[in-house]
Amino acid sequence: MSKKKKIVITTSEAGANTASDLQPTTSKLSTEKQSTISPDGLLFGYKNYMWALAGVGLMALGFALMAGGHMPSPDVWDPDLIYSFRRTVLAPICILSGLGLQVVAIFAKK
């Protein structure tokens, strides 16, 4: 059994509120609170984006330092090529520093 919906149409009576009598609603939030978006439409300032770009560049440098490293001869295993200072220490430091710069870029004031 399906129930039928009943449609009710009301008409405005004399003395009822008209469109000119209605007032717009007001926000319950404080009007003194500043918007987080700047007038130019960007969420962060110029310096924040520069910090973020520097962080991305530093992470890319770390990944580039970690890349590569094939053995000159497939018959010989040389652990000094794979486990070098550049790949085990310097590259992770660059990557973590880049991530740190990303945090600075997010939390720094405009």
Image (cartoon, rainbow, N blue to C red):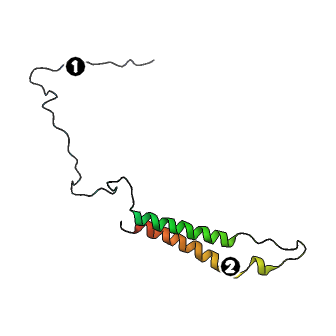
Residue at 88% in and 71% down: 74
Dot 2: element: helix
Residue at 50% in and 65% down: 53
Kindly check if marks 1 and 2 are in contact, taking CB atoms under 8 A apart as contact: no
- How crowded pointer 2 is (Cα within 10 Å; few <14, some 14-19, many 20+) is rated as some
Mark sitting on residue 10: 1
How far is mark 1 from mark 2, CA to CA? 79 Å
Picture layout, residue 1 above or below residue 66: above
Residue at 49% in and 71% down: 101
Residue at 20% in and 41% down: 25
Where is residue 18? Give x, y as percent. 14, 27
Identify the image quadrant of residue 60: bottom right
Left or right: 1 with respect to 88?
left
Label 1 or label 2, whichever lies nearer to me, is: 2
Identify the image quadrant of residue 69: bottom right
Picture layout, residue 101 above or below residue 22: below
Where is residue 93? Give x, y as percent. 59, 77
Dot 1: element: loop
Where is residue 44? Give x, y as percent. 39, 60
Residue type marked 1: Thr
- How crowded pointer 1 is (Cα within 10 Å; few <14, some 14-19, many 20+) is rated as few
Where is residue 103? Give x, y as percent. 47, 69
Q: Which residue is mark 2?
A: 86
